[in-house]
Image (spheres, helix red, strand yellow):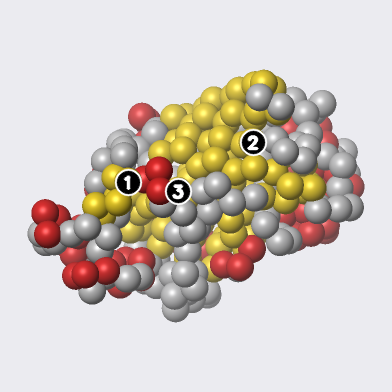
Amino acid sequence: MALDETHILDLTPVGISSLSSVFEAADPLAVLSGIDRKSLPQLPISGVKFHAPVERQEVWAAGVTYKRSKTARMEESTAAASCYDRVYASPRPELFFKASPHRVSGHGEPLRIRTDSNWNVPEPELTLVLSSKLQLVGFTVGNDMSSRDIEGDNPLYLPQAKCYNQCCGLGPWITLTVGMPPRSEIGIRLVIHRGGKLIYDGRTSVDHMARTFENLISWLGRDNSFPTGAFLLTGTGIVPESHITLEQGDIVEIKIDGVGTLINPVVQG
Ligand code: DO4
Ligand code: MG
């Protein structure tokens, strides 16, 4: 558990060694606030290796929830333009399976460019952390890595553009729902560095999302169960201009207000 910007607390001495033991509790906040922090070991963040904050949960994603995503997709695919246009305004959102836990990278771990793709971007997305009852227990930062040439070639290729090894970043940690600012104050920033230089800097606000969290969760839960909980990336509102594609060695930084900054190096598959 993060204590402040510089230290984390080791909760194992009080018997908390999994995320789900907190998230499946009737009141996750009560579990954490009932702990006597002074008695626990404090570790400097600089010496900690972060794993993705995912255990056995499935990772799903919503798409075309911001106007910028709709426009970018309509530009990348003439064949599918009307699909993107319609889904933005339809009652039923676009929801897709993004990753099983072994495909997810945590803070500092690499994210991959597919070997068979030449146009790849990060997608910075506020990510909902859901209990097995689909209760919204927290938020984290998500990176929905996407191969735009594969997705743009044919919408039926979407699962290949989205789901492969090291296709998803999550982390660095989870903020409980009570700790988040109101939606109108959650800014998202995406920065890409190449060879020590800034090559992209974009921002949006969750306030520009066309759907509510509750709407996305209710569609995800239709005739669908999540016995170990789920993560739901809520879609991107930042899409770099069409000439930008990720390269081996790029550093992708995503900052979401209320959570923190997820940083990943990019590797070429
Ligand atoms: O339909 C393509 C994917 C959309 C997406 O991932 C997004 O809008 O974030
Ligand atoms: Mg996305």
Q: Could you tell me which secondary element the residue under label 3 belongs to?
A: strand
Q: Position of residue 227 (x, y in %)?
A: 44, 78
Calculate the distance from the C-alpha at mark 1 to the C-alpha at mark 3. 15 Å
Q: What label does residue 172 carry, if any?
A: 3
Q: What label does residue 7 carry, if any?
A: none
Identify which residue is drawn at 71% across, 61% down: 165
Q: Are marks 1 and 2 in contact (CB under 8 Å)?
A: no
Identify which residue is drawn at 37% across, 30% down: 184
Q: Is residue 215 visible?
A: no
Q: Is mark 1 within 8 Å of ligand 2?
A: no
Identify which residue is drawn at 40% across, 62% down: 130
- Identify whether 28 is placed above or below 138: below
- Identify whether 135 is placed above or below 250: below
**Quadrant housing the N terminus:** bottom left
Q: Mark 2: few, some, or many residues within 10 Å (few <14, many ≥20)?
A: many
The residue where tag 2 is placed is: 251
Identify which residue is drawn at 54% across, 40% down: 263
As drawn, is 160 to the left or to the right of 197? right
Chain-order first, disc 3 or disc 2: 3
Q: Nearer the viewer, mark 1 or mark 2?
A: 1
Q: Nearer the viewer, residue 164 or 68?
A: 164
Q: How many marks?
A: 3
Task: Tell me the amino acid under the disc marked 2.
Answer: Ile
Q: Position of residue 211 (x, y in %)?
A: 49, 43
Q: Mark 1: few, some, or many residues within 10 Å (few <14, many ≥20)?
A: some
Q: What label does residue 44 carry, if any?
A: 1
Chain-order first, disc 1 or disc 2: 1
- Identify whether 267 is placed above or below 132: above
Q: In which image quadrant can residue 81 be found?
A: top right
